[in-house]
Image (cartoon, rainbow, N blue to C red):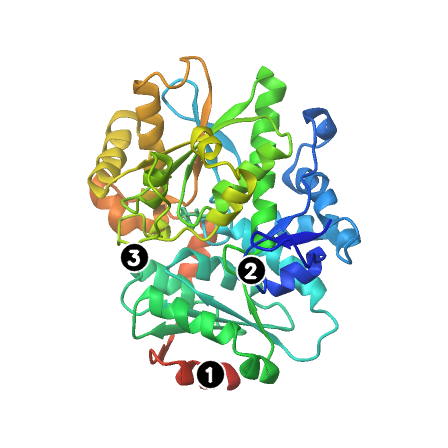
C-alpha cells in the first residue's frame, strides 16, 4: 500500500516513510492510495482484538518493511480489551475504550504507534525525541506508550495550571525517558512551540525529532480495530450493521470508524457529538467549514476549533452534499453535559466521563426523535474512564468514582514537571540538553 497526501497526489510513500514523516510535505495528511474491501466472512476465524487488527491492517502494511512485523506489533499494542456493555436503556450500548494504562481511547493508537516506531528506529544510534503538545489525554497516552522504550525520549508540553491535578500528575509520573514540561502559556502556545521544532531542519540535524499527534497514521489505523470487533460481534448475533455515536474533537477516533466502514465492516450510521466547539455541527448543518479558536469546556480533550482530521473526511467524501448527508453531528453544551452525567446516574446508576456524556446525550436525542427504529441497536464510544475527570463527575453524582487499577498505579507514583518558558529558544535548549 502506498500513501498520498490529501492535498497533492504525489509523491506516494510507503507506510514506514509516511509514519516517519507525520505530516506530508505539502501540509496535507497521509491517506491510503486505495481502500481495501473486506466482508464480515473474512473475519470468521478472528475474535480477539490483536487478531482482528492484524487481519484488517494487513493490506495497509502490504509491501512495507513493517509488514512481517504486523502481528507482533498488534500483540504488543492491544494488551487490553474494548468490551461492549449494555446500557440500562434498551438496545443502547457503550464500547468501553478506557481499559488501557491511561484510561482513555488514545492508549490504543499511542501503543500501536510506539510499537511501530520502535521497529522502524531500531537501527538508529541517536535517541529519537517524541515531542507532544497536550491539553491532557494525548500526552499521558504517548508518555505511557514510549515510557522505558530504548532509543526514545518523550518531551510533553502542557499549559501550566490548565490541566486537572490528576491529569498533571499523570503527565509527570513517568520519569526516566519521559520529561513533562509545564509551559507558561496556553495549549495553543504549546502546540505552536512543538510545530516550530518539528519543521526546524537545523534543530532536527542536531537531534532526531518525531511527532505523535492525532494525524499520525500510526494512531489512526489501529483505531479501526475496535470498531471492527464491535460491529462484527453484532453482525454475528443480528446480521445487521451497528450504529455508532462518537465524542469528537480532532476527528481521529471518528475517521477511524468511517474508514472501517469504507473497508466493508458492518457499520451503520455514524453520529458525531461535539462539545460547545461547534465547527463540525455547523458545517453538517450547511455552513461553510470555518475553523474557530477553541472554547474551554468540561470535555476538555474535545476542545478543538480546527479538527485536524477534517481533510481525511473530505478525502473520503469529496462531494460536500454527500458528506453532509452521511453524518449526524450535534453540539452539546456544558449544562447538558452536567445534566446528562447527573441524570444517568440518578436514573440508572451509570457513570460517564464528560466526553462520553456528549455522545450519550446525542443518543437520547436520536431515540426521542425516532431517528433510530426502536429495535435498532446503537453503540456510544466511551472514550475515557470517569475517574480521570473526578473533579467534574464526583460533585454531580454525589459519590466517589472508583479508580481503575492501571490509573491508580500511575497516581501512586511521585510526579515531577519542569517549568518551560513560553519561548522557542528555551524549548530548543531543553530538547538539546540531556
Ligand atoms: C481525545 C479525546 C476525544 C476526542 O477524540 P478525537 O480523536 O480528537 O476526535 C474524546 N474523548 C476523550 C476522552 C479524548 O481523550
Residue placed most toward the observer, 106 or 307: 307
| Mark 3 Cβ inside 8 Å of ligand 1 | no
Dot in front, 1 or 3: 3
Residue placed most toward the observer, 100 or 432: 432
Residue 212 lies, in percent from the top left, at 53, 62
In the image, residue 173 above or below residue 424: above
Mark linked to residue 156:
none
Query: What's the distance in space between the residues labelled 2 and 3, CA to CA?
Result: 30 Å
SS under mark 3 = loop
Residue 174 lies, in percent from the top left, at 48, 68
SS under mark 2 = helix
In the image, residue 378 above or below residue 263: above
Residue placed most toward the observer, 207 or 433: 207
Residue 135 lies, in percent from the top left, at 36, 60
Q: Label 3 belongs to which residue?
A: 293
Give whichever of discs 1 and 3 has the lower sequence position: 3
Dot 2 crowding, Cα within 10 Å, few <14, some 14–19, many 20+: many
Dot 1 crowding, Cα within 10 Å, few <14, some 14–19, many 20+: some
Question: In the rendered image, is residue 292 in sight?
Answer: yes
Judged left or right of residue 400, residue 327 is right
* Residue at x 67%, y 64% (from the top left corner): 118
Residue 326 lies, in percent from the top left, at 47, 30
Query: What's the distance in space between the residues labelled 1 and 3, CA to CA?
Result: 27 Å
Q: Label 1 belongs to which residue?
A: 428
Give whichever of discs 2 and 3 has the lower sequence position: 2
SS under mark 1 = helix
Q: Label 2 belongs to which residue?
A: 145
Give whichever of discs 1 and 2 has the lower sequence position: 2
Amino acid at each position: 500500500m502506498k500513501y498520498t497526501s490529501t492535498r497533492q497526489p504525489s509523491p506516494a510513500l510507503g507506510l514506514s516513510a509516511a509514519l516517519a514523516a507525520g505530516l506530508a510535505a505539502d501540509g496535507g495528511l497521509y491517506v491510503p492510495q486505495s481502500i481495501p474491501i473486506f466482508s464480515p466472512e473474512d473475519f470468521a476465524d478472528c475474535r480477539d482484538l490483536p487478531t482482528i487488527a492484524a487481519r484488517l491492517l494487513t493490506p495497509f502494511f502490504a509491501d512495507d518493511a513493517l509488514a512481517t512485523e504486523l502481528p507482533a506489533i498488534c500483540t504488543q499494542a492491544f494488551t487490553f480489551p474494548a468490551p461492549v456493555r449494555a446500557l440500562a436503556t434498551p438496545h443502547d450500548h457503550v464500547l468501553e475504550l478506557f481499559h488501557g494504562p491511561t484510561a482513555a481511547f488514545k492508549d490504543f493508537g499511542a501503543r500501536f504507534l510506539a510499537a511501530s516506531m520502535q521497529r522502524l528506529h531500531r537501527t538508529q544510534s541517536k535517541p529519537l525525541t517524541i515531542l507532544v503538545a497536550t491539553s491532557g489525554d494525548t500526552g499521558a497516552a504517548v508518555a505511557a506508550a514510549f515510557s522505558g522504550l530504548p532509543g526514545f525520549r518523550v518531551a510533553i508540553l502542557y499549559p501550566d495550571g490548565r490541566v486537572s491535578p490528576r491529569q498533571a500528575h499523570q503527565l509527570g509520573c513517568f520519569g526516566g525517558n519521559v520529561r513533562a514540561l509545564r509551559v507558561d502559556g496556553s495549549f495553543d502556545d504549546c502546540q505552536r512551540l512543538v510545530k516550530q521544532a518539528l519543521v526546524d531542519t537545523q534543530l532536527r540535524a542536531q537531534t532526531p525529532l518525531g511527532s505523535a499527534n492525532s494525524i499520525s497514521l500510526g494512531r489512526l489505523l489501529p483505531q479501526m480495530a475496535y470498531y471492527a470487533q464491535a460491529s462484527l460481534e453484532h453482525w454475528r448475533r443480528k446480521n445487521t450493521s451497528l450504529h455508532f455515536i462518537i465524542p469528537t474533537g480532532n476527528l481521529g477516533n471518528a475517521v477511524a470508524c468511517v474508514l472501517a466502514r469504507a473497508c466493508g465492516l458492518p457499520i451503520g450510521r455514524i453520529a458525531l457529538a461535539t462539545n460547545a466547539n461547534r465547527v463540525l455541527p455547523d458545517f453538517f448543518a450547511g455552513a461553510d467549514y470555518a475553523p474557530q479558536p477553541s472554547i474551554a469546556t468540561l470535555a476538555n480533550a474535545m476542545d478543538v476549533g480546527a479538527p485536524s482530521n477534517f481533510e481525511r473526511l473530505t478525502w473520503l467524501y469529496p462531494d460536500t452534499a454527500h458528506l453532509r448527508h452521511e453524518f449526524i453531528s450535534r453540539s452539546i453544551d456544558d449544562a447538558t453535559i452536567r445534566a446528562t452525567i447527573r441524570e444517568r446516574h440518578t436514573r440508572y446508576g451509570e457513570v460517564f466521563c464528560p466526553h462520553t456524556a456528549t455522545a450519550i446525550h446525542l443518543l437520547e436525542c436520536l431515540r426521542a426523535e425516532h431517528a433510530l427504529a426502536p429495535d435498532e441497536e446503537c453503540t456510544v464510544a466511551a472514550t475515557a474512564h470517569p475517574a480521570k475527570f473526578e473533579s467534574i463527575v464526583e460533585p454531580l453524582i454525589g459519590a466517589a468514582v472508583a479508580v481503575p487499577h492501571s490509573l491508580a498505579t500511575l497516581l501512586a507514583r511521585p510526579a515531577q514537571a519542569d517549568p518551560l518558558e513560553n519561548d522557542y529558544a528555551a524549548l530548543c535548549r531543553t530538547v538539546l540538553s540531556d
